[in-house]
Amino acid sequence: MAQELAYVIITPYSLHKSRTGGILARLITRTGLELVGARMFAPSAELVNRYSEVIVSADDPQDRSIQELIRSYILKNLAPDSKTGRRRRVMMLLFQGEDAVRKVRSVVGNITAERSGGETIRDTYGDLILDDNRNVRYFEPAVLAPPNAQEAQLKLKLWSQYSDTDGGLTDNTIVYAPGEAPQRTLVLIKPDNFRFPTGRPGNVIDFFSRTGLYIIAIKVHRMSVAEAMEFYGPVREILRTRLKDVVASRAKAALEKELGFKLPPAEEPKLGEILGPLFGDNQFDNIVKFMSGGSPSETPEDQREQPGSEKCIALVYEGPNAVQKIRDVLGPTDPSKAPPGSIRREFGQTVMVNAAHASDSEENARREIGIIKIGDNNFKRVVEAFYGK
């Protein structure tokens, strides 16, 4: 069966209620598809109007009245606020694989007023409430997804056209109380969460939702060797110097066992001076390889800028005290020292394979966001590579 590209739009209400993680976990685990792109949008009135015009389709198995309801919902809830002009956030997710559109739609589900057991995303997170006269009292679809591959192509090409002007890092979309000073911080959902189709990326995002912060940017990213070297550059010197004592002790024990005699205690620091920097460089190589798929020592310089083989999800969270709130939920670098209920305690394995990264200061957040190029439009590149320009 041919490869297809499918999309899911997470609505402003679902984002506001922090349902992103649960939605993503279901989509990955129940479709088995690859998440190949993600982008935040703050849609303009023009994009919303054009999108609403192609919602009603004779090829959609959903009842025509429901399609019209969705169209009205889009015009009202995805467009900029009619009173303030402030744009609203939506998240677009791209999935690729065989029979992708049908698989996504089956997990998303159709809209019905009949109560069900929560089998689909819309069963769980959506609502259609009617009064005694069958008039609509309340409607929330939770997510939007195309009914077939042709509709997916039409609508993805449309959103791609606006992905530069209406997408990326969504500024000025959140209203804060007087006196609140929002911060921004970067989170990376690390490659260990993508070894096979698993709900872990969504589950990690679900943990971060406890902070009450807002996602204002998202990107599926394959870190290059050069990016990983720059990103983790500050760690390199720490590894070269702080591990000297550990390396010296281990080297002394290994040499004594191999040579069969005790080394004088005064010689141990010398081993650290010689081997510490080498061991630190080796550890740094391992970190870069874990994040990008290639180590500096094995990758020619002319290939270091190429996207790596390992995938992560980069997110920017915004809100008061964002840096500390995120790091509190994440937990310390070593999962064995992380408290119960933290991300690294739940999902981490080692100091390196520890589920996620988060900036440790506003200054580092700005530096890391710049390295990742969070606003870079690889969403558009995925769409154009699949369908052509």
Image (tube, rainbow, N blue to C red):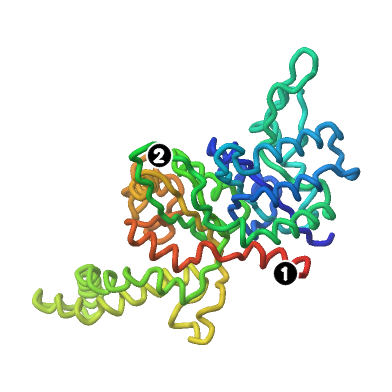
Mark 1, Cα crowd under 10 Å, few <14 / some 14-19 / many 20+, is: few
Assign the N terminus to one quadrant of the image: bottom right
Residue at image point 55% right, 72% down: 308
Mark 1 or 2: the one toward you: 1
Q: Which residue is mark 2?
A: 341
- Residue 181 in the image: state x and y as whole percent: 35, 45
Residue closest to the far front: 83
Q: Residue at x 35, y 41 (%)?
A: 180
The amino acid type, in three-letter code, at marker 1 is Ala
Q: Amino acid at mark 2?
A: Gly
Q: Earlier in the sequence, mark 1 or mark 2?
A: 2
Number of other residues with Cα within 10 Å of mark 2, as a class: few under 14, some 14 to 19, many 20 or more: few
Q: Which mark is residue 313?
A: none
Task: Reply above or below: 110 against 201.
Answer: above
Q: Which residue is mark 1?
A: 385
Asked if one can make out residue 328 in the rendered structure from this viewpoint, the answer is no
**Residue 372: percent from the left, percent from the top?**
48, 66
Of 78 and 315, nearer the camera is: 78
User: Splitting the image into 4 quarters, where does residue 278 fall?
Assistant: bottom left
Left or right for 110, reference 40: right
